[in-house]
Amino acid sequence: MHDQLKPIQIGTHIFPSNAFLAPLSGITDKSFRTIAARYGAGMVVSEMIASAALTNGHADMARRLGRPERLPNIIQLAGCEGRWMAEGAKIAEDSGADIIDINMGCPSKRVTNGYAGSALMRVPDKAQSLIESVLGATSLPVTLKMRLGWNDDCINSPEIAQDAAKAGIQMITIHGRTRQQFYKGAAKWSPVRDVVEAVDVPVVVNGDIVDIATAKRALELSGAAAVMIGRGAQGQPWLLGQVGAALHGNPVPATPALKERQNLMKEHYSLMMEEYGTALGVRCARKHLGWYMDVLALEFTIPKAARAALLTQGNALQVPALIDQLFDQLVEVAA
Ligand SMILES: Cc1cc2nc3c(=O)[nH]c(=O)nc-3n(C[C@H](O)[C@H](O)[C@H](O)COP(=O)(O)O)c2cc1C
């Protein structure tokens, strides 16, 4: 079944595989999206951009508009007022974005208190008017990401999806949890099928997909057109290419050899210094360094001191040498 997956087309963009990188605030910046795209991600989405802050010229929101290499620039907007969302969409379009994605899945209290993110799912009329504001403000294709519903008594994603698709939304991603679950419990993939059956546009299944097996199972249970992977790609951006190849029935690329991972860590670091500047970049990059090491630690013992040195170094110029030293000290874990 999976090797018959159809390529997803949104507007004029045809995506190279059906394994997508999820938007993760603070993580899927331009640097990470560029690397994920190089390793075969079929689609990458920006970090959520608060539309009002973007309109007010907030520097970090403007940074989030950065274009990744190789793939279309999909800019995700969040907000609770149609006029800000419309304004944000125009700014994104003017900056060269290719597609706008609307965030209706974020459970954060800061976001939901203002009826943005997943809180919009409690007020479907407001959600619909916000969607229409964005569609009316831009000539770009618009997609939507949401959860199954607000809570177990309010699983309304099929209805919201239907209205959104009627209005012109071109793809819908469903994170298989409710807002009230936050990130707790397991994501449910079967209820996503109700959304698939409700609309004619492609539906993407998301939540707790971490490898080829879970990607296949999520597709089977949901009947979705593609999978979206977030946390599972942290420290291993090549996972998207591997999952995509497996779903399409192609040979699965090998996990990069150690030397390549060493170079990748250094390159990722240097891309982040460019994107953020070193003062902020040093701090933002630590989580990625930690995740790369967590993935390495599945196969190798990493001396505690080498790990700590890398995660506490405050001078960006010293970090590449520390990465080299770390790889020199790896000891293979006995099988
Ligand atoms: C740290 C973090 C940041 C996130 N930021 C966003 C975001 O900016 N926009 C969004 O739509 N979802 C965001 N999400 C939700 C993810 O896109 C995804 O729906 C969720 O993590 C489930 O997928 P996963 O299990 O593959 O990570 C975030 C999740 C996490 C853990």
Image (cartoon, rainbow, N blue to C red):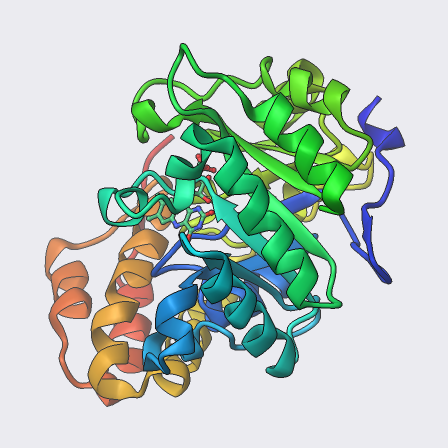
Question: Residue 190: horizontal and vertical position, in percent?
Answer: 60, 13
Name above or below for residue 334 compared with residue 278. Answer: above
Q: Is residue 255 visible in this depiction of the protein?
A: no
Q: Residue at x 44, y 80 (%)?
A: 271
Q: Is residue 104 left or right of residue 307?
A: right
Quadrant location of residue 37? Answer: bottom right
Question: Residue 320: horizontal and vertical position, in percent?
Answer: 31, 80
Q: Residue at x 68, y 57 (%)?
A: 135
Q: Residue at x 31, y 88 (%)?
A: 277
Q: Is residue 140 left or right of residue 80?
A: right
Q: Nearer the viewer, residue 230 or 244?
A: 230
Quadrant location of residue 100? Answer: bottom right
Q: Residue furthest top?
A: 153
Question: Residue 122: horizontal and vertical position, in percent?
Answer: 41, 29
Q: Is residue 87 visible in this depiction of the protein?
A: yes
Q: Residue at x 35, y 71 (%)?
A: 53
Q: Nearer the viewer, residue 208 or 223?
A: 223
Quadrant location of residue 157? Answer: top right
Name above or below for residue 292 compared with residue 334. Answer: below
Q: Quadrant of ligand 1?
A: top left
Name above or below for residue 21 compared with residue 174. Answer: below
Question: Residue 2: horizontal and vertical position, in percent?
Answer: 80, 27
